Image (cartoon, grey):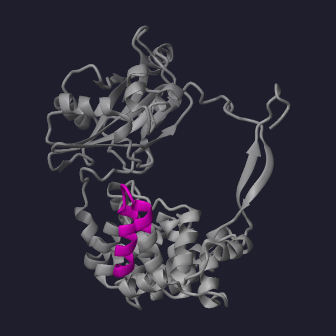
Amino acid sequence: MQFKQLAVVFQKLEETSSRNTMTTILAELFRGATVSDVGYICYLLQGRVVPLYEPVEFGMADKLVIRGVAESLGIEASQVVTIFKRTGDLGKTVAELKNNPPKKSQLSMADIAIMSNNSYQPDLSVLDVYNKLLLIAKSGGAGSQEQKLTHLSGLLRSLDASSASFIVRIVLGKLRLGFSDMTMIDELSWMEAGDKSLKQEIERAYNVRPDLGFISSTVRKLGVKGLQRVIPKPMTPIMMARANRLTSAQEIFKKIGKCAVEYKYDGLRLQVHKEGKNIKLYSRKLEDLTPSFPDIVEAVFAQVKARDIIFEGEIVAFNPDTHVFMPFQETMQRRRKYDIAEKAVEIPVKLFAFELLYVNGISLLELGYKERKEKLKQHLQKGKTIIYAEERIVTDEQSVDMMFEESVKLHFEGIIAKKLDGLYEAGIRGWNWIKYKRAMNTRLADTIDVLVMGYTLGEGKRTDFGVGQFLTGVYDKKKDMY
């Protein structure tokens, strides 16, 4: 498929606000695409070149992209800026400039040399464009900005106006076509069955392997039946199971009866992946937090002997002098890119492990809670940093209330009750887990008064709306200013 054909679909998607219409447009696109193109198309529709959980970004700001646009057209950057100030969207800017080049546009000798030496060809395929974007995203180290600039300007030079506008928005992270991952899951069902009847089955696989490129390619090649074999894969995060909430021990027992109760730790949920000597730590939103917690990585090597494993827990900061666990805000200070070693000493953490999802090639998602916990205990050696999250089997409401009070004294959030035979429901807020927190019946406390002081222009799909972001200020009484 040529990229300019995909750009036509981008345009159609941008011009509709109907999710159903988007679904049918996407289904038609995928039916017409080759099996080999489907995965790449999926990533490009998301404005990316890798799955969302991989921390690969283009790293190009407006100023650098403006230079790229100018070099691709052989004009001054100031000419691009003039149009950009009027349109508020660099994608629209490059399209306008390619359709109506400034009269004074003149290629310099340097531009001619670049054009004669580049390897770009007209009518680029989806794969051609994908590979160039991947090259831009993965350019790093000394001179990387100039490398990105050269690749981008050469790519823009070889594309038509509409295609170039979408490329600019992709590298800026502003594609914004107005649909979510769930829309694409709907689309796969429509592609296969002509309706949404297969959505649940596709979503189940996606929650275990949240890589739309992989999911789409599998469905396009093997049909939905190809997803039946999808199991967890180390280094690919699983969408985390979530708990429903109730407000009393009585309600919990009415819902699930005899159950296991664990403390609800006031920390940061973490999914640990170990594959041989490689370790990755993922957040609830599938962010790679490995660099922020070198102490946890070291503890995994020391305390977990399984070759391949995926387990979950909660990171909680603690005071080594008082041995008191600290609030969530303290734990969050460890999520950083700089001064990591210093903060690790200043704010030590512990990881309370409470779930085992996969070990040495075997998925545990279909096992009940008790079996998963028992196997977790077997694979976790005692140590100071990773701690097995103890559970208590309770048969009456009084025991639940007692454990709830204990959790409060230990500075935790509350408790979480789990069905003894409950499965791990990836990505689902089900009734296998029920949380009962201290703040369950209180109003939202973390509010702040701000004054709306301005806004930024909308870009991409938000251009027509007019507003991209609101700019707000907080009043400083001492200085009498915002």
Can residue 250 be seen? Answer: no
Q: Main secondary structure of the magenta part?
A: helix
Residue 365 within the magenta-colored segment of the rendering: no
Picture quadrant where residue 396 is located: top left
Q: Is residue 375 above or below residue 382?
A: below
Residue 114 left/right relative to 208: right
Toward the top, the furthest residue is: 322
Look at the image and tell me in which quarter the N terminus lies.
Answer: bottom left
Q: Position of residue 388 (x, y in %)?
A: 28, 25
Please give the name of the residue rendered at 58% of the width and 70% of the height, measured from the top-left corner.
66
Look at the image and tell me in which quarter the C terminus lies.
Answer: top right
Can residue 47 be seen? Answer: yes
Q: Position of residue 12 (x, y in %)?
A: 57, 83
Please give the name of the residue rendered at 40% of the width and 45% of the height, measured from the top-left corner.
241
Q: Which residues are magenta?
A: 127-148
Name the residue nearer the viewer: 196 or 181.
181
Name the residue nearer the viewer: 102 or 374.
102
Q: Position of residue 23 (x, y in %)?
A: 51, 77
Picture quadrant where residue 226 is located: bottom left
Residue 145 within the magenta-colored segment of the rendering: yes
Q: Position of residue 407 (x, y in %)?
A: 46, 18
